Amino acid sequence: MSDSVIVFPTDFSNQSMAAAEWVRKMAAMENARIHCVYSIEMPHYYGAFVNSAAMMPSASDLENFGQQRMKEFLSENSSYFDPEPVTAVLVGKPAIQIVDYAREHQALMIVMATHGYRGIKHAVLGSTTEAVLREADCPVLVIRSKD
């Protein structure tokens, strides 16, 4: 296996799995290692709604949660990943974390799914995929989920 890297961001949804087959194909074509990444954003709390700091999860708590979910995700989808991918749980704004991770690892490409939201849903939820497309230095292959 070469030192080449393909980054596969996931949110563990069925929609994100729409890109899994493409990740596998691209990794095989490029003789690259898959890096499966999950980015979780710190929740925003406002003073009036928080009774104590103990209610707020720490970055470490979120990372531990993410690592457990990643382990479950890979176990549930092991047929897509051989060899097992490198994994990373990132805490912060997902698009920024994904792009920074790809830069740091000099990724050949990022392969990710999009939910394909439109209208109000897109305006409210935003688009991590769109932000990654705008900021990435490497090619980004976007697979539209059929769900």
Image (cartoon, grey):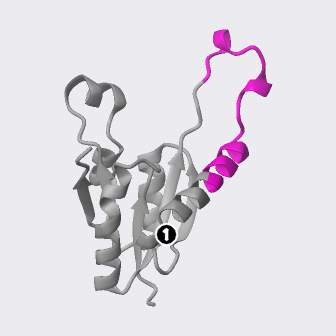
Q: Position of residue 33 (x, y in %)?
A: 44, 79
Q: Residue at x 27, y 53 (%)?
A: 133
User: Is residue 138 visible in this depiction of the protein?
Assistant: no
Residue furthest bottom as drawn: 1
Q: Residue at x 42, y 73 (%)?
A: 106
Image height of 110 relative to 120, above or below: below
The N terminus: image quadrant: bottom left
Residue 49 falls left or right of residue 23: right
Q: Residue at x 54, y 40 (%)?
A: 41
Q: Residue at x 47, y 69 (%)?
A: 35
Image height of 88 relative to 93, above or below: below
Q: Position of residue 81 (x, y in %)?
A: 45, 73
Q: Position of residue 115 (x, y in %)?
A: 29, 43
Q: Position of residue 71 (x, y in %)?
A: 60, 60
Residue 58 sits inside the magenta stretch: yes
Residue 67 sits inside the magenta stretch: yes
Magenta stretch: dominant SS? helix
Disc 1, SS: helix
Specify the segment rendered in magenta: 45-68
User: Is residue 75 visible in this depiction of the protein?
Assistant: yes
- Amino acid type at circle 1 is Ser
The C terminus: image quadrant: top left
Q: Nearer the viewer, residue 64 or 59?
A: 64
Residue 120 falls left or right of residue 23: left
Q: Which residue is mark 1?
A: 78
Residue furthest left as drawn: 119
Crowd around label 1: few <14 · some 14–19 · many ≥20 (10 Å):
few
Image height of 53 relative to 58, above or below: above
